């Protein structure tokens, strides 16, 4: 039962990996057919075949191919060719990563089955060995009891073999697919190198000059195909220049907006600085007035304190005089009392 469980898990992983590999192979076949059409079809036939290209390429690349096909000729810039190559490389790299994941998972499940089977076998062998007792050992009974541990070891070996076999098959298929993808990438890059505008400009000029010379030598030779090629190349060149001009206009507009924003910030900063300078000037004036008022108030307070001190001194002198007069009056009063007492004493005698 355990062997069946591990084998079903490994078979499931193996089936998913096969589906991904078959899907990648079908996609590679579709890409090969699409680029074959791009290389050998022209005119209306090319436009007809490119109607469903969005199912193979992303929207930006599909739009670029459709736009070039409508011009009657396929030429690309270096950036466009680089975008196509990078997209293909990314697709192949992601697919290879998925396959490597399923290969590793198959191996890990096989190893897990191996350790599980060995663990079961060791556990049962230990129990069998501990159950033996005495000198009488029946070999048939021993073999019967060891059939269980051997079954556990079969779980491990079967899972390991099935996991390794699945990983080997997936790796072999991935190797074949990778070789085909690499060959396809080389063919696409070689084809696109011959279709880059920068590398075709001098060849196109020589072709145009040769066409003019041939026309002068033999006016009856047909030149519609070459004129169509020249017109298509010029259309692509004009489109490229139009895109460049549009990007330049956007850059200029962004620069103008940035300049306007900087000017507004500078003007706002200058107005703020003016307001701050006016505020600081008013604060200085208020501080100056406050200092003047404080000085005048201090002078008035000093004069008031001087007057108060003079009044206090005058009062002190008057109080001192009153005290001295009071002492003299007390002395006179005492003398008067003594005299009266003396007179009374004399009268009593």
Image (tube, rainbow, N blue to C red):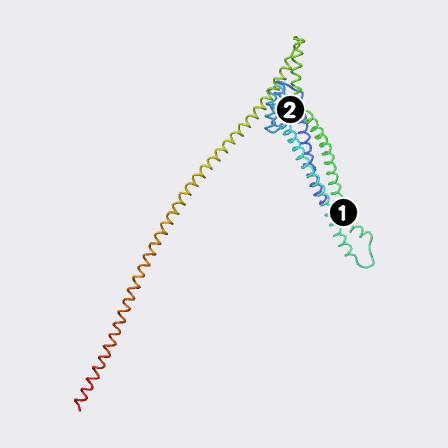
Q: Residues within 10 Å of mark 1 (few under 14, many from 20)?
A: many
Left or right of residue 348, residue 24 in this image: right
In the rendered view, tell whether residue 93 sits above or below residue 3: above
| Foreground: disc 2 or disc 1 | 2
Residue drawn where x is 33% and y is 56% of the image:
299
Quarter assignment of residue 192:
top right
The quarter of the rendered structure image containing the N terminus is: top right
Within-10-Å neighbours for mark 2: few <14, some 14–19, many 20+:
some
Horizontal and vertical percent for residue 341? 20, 85
147 up-or-down from 32: above or below = below
Above or below, 196 against 161 in this view is above
> What x and y, as percent, mark residue 348?
17, 90
Q: CA distance from mark 2 to mark 1?
A: 67 Å
**Between 152 and 71, the one nearer to me in the picture:** 71
Precedes in sequence: disc 2 or disc 1: 1
Question: In the visual, does 317 lie left or right of 56?
Answer: left
Residue 256 x/y as whole percent: 50, 31
- In the structure shown, which secondary structural element does the residue marked by tag 2 occupy? helix
Q: Position of residue 287 (x, y in %)?
A: 38, 49
Marker disc for residue 153: 1
Residue drawn at point x = 42 percent, y = 43 percent: 277
Return the residue at label 2: 198
């Amino acid at each position: 039962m355990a062997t069946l469980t591990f084998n079903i898990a490994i078979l499931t992983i193996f089936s998913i990996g096969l589906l991904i590999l078959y899907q990648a192979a079908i996609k590679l076949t579709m890409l090969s057919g699409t680029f074959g059409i791009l290389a050998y079809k022209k005119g209306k036939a090319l436009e007809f075949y490119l109607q469903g290209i969005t199912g193979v390429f992303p929207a930006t690349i599909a739009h670029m191919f459709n736009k070039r096909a409508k011009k009657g000729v396929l030429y690309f810039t270096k950036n466009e060719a680089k975008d196509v190559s990078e997209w293909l490389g990314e697709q192949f790299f992601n697919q290879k990563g998925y396959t490597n994941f399923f290969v590793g998972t198959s191996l890990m499940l096989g190893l897990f089955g191996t350790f599980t089977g060995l663990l079961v076998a060791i556990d049962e062998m230990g129990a069998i060995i501990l159950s033996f007792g005495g000198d009488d050992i029946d070999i048939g009974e021993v073999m019967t009891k060891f059939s269980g541990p051997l079954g556990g070891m079969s779980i491990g070996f079967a899972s390991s073999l099935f996991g390794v076999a699945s990983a080997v098959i997936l790796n072999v298929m991935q190797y074949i697919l990778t070789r085909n993808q690499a060959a396809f990438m080389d063919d696409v890059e070689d084809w696109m190198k011959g279709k880059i505008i920068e590398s075709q400009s001098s060849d196109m000029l020589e072709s145009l000059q040769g066409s003019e010379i041939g026309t002068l030598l033999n006016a009856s030779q047909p030149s519609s195909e070459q004129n169509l090629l020249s017109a298509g190349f010029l259309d692509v060149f004009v489109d490229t220049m139009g895109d460049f001009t549009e990007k330049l206009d956007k850059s200029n507009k962004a620069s103008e907006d940035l300049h306007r924003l900087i000017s507004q910030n500078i003007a706002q900063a200058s107005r703020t600085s003016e307001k701050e300078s006016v505020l600081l000037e008013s604060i200085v004036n208020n501080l100056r007035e406050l200092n003047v008022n404080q000085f005048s108030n201090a002078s008035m307070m000093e004069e008031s304190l001087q007057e108060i001190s003079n009044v206090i001194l005058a009062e002190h002198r008057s109080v001192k005089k009153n005290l001295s007069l009071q002492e003299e009056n007390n002395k006179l009063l005492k003398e008067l009392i003594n005299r009266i007492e003396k007179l009374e004493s004399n009268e009593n005698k």
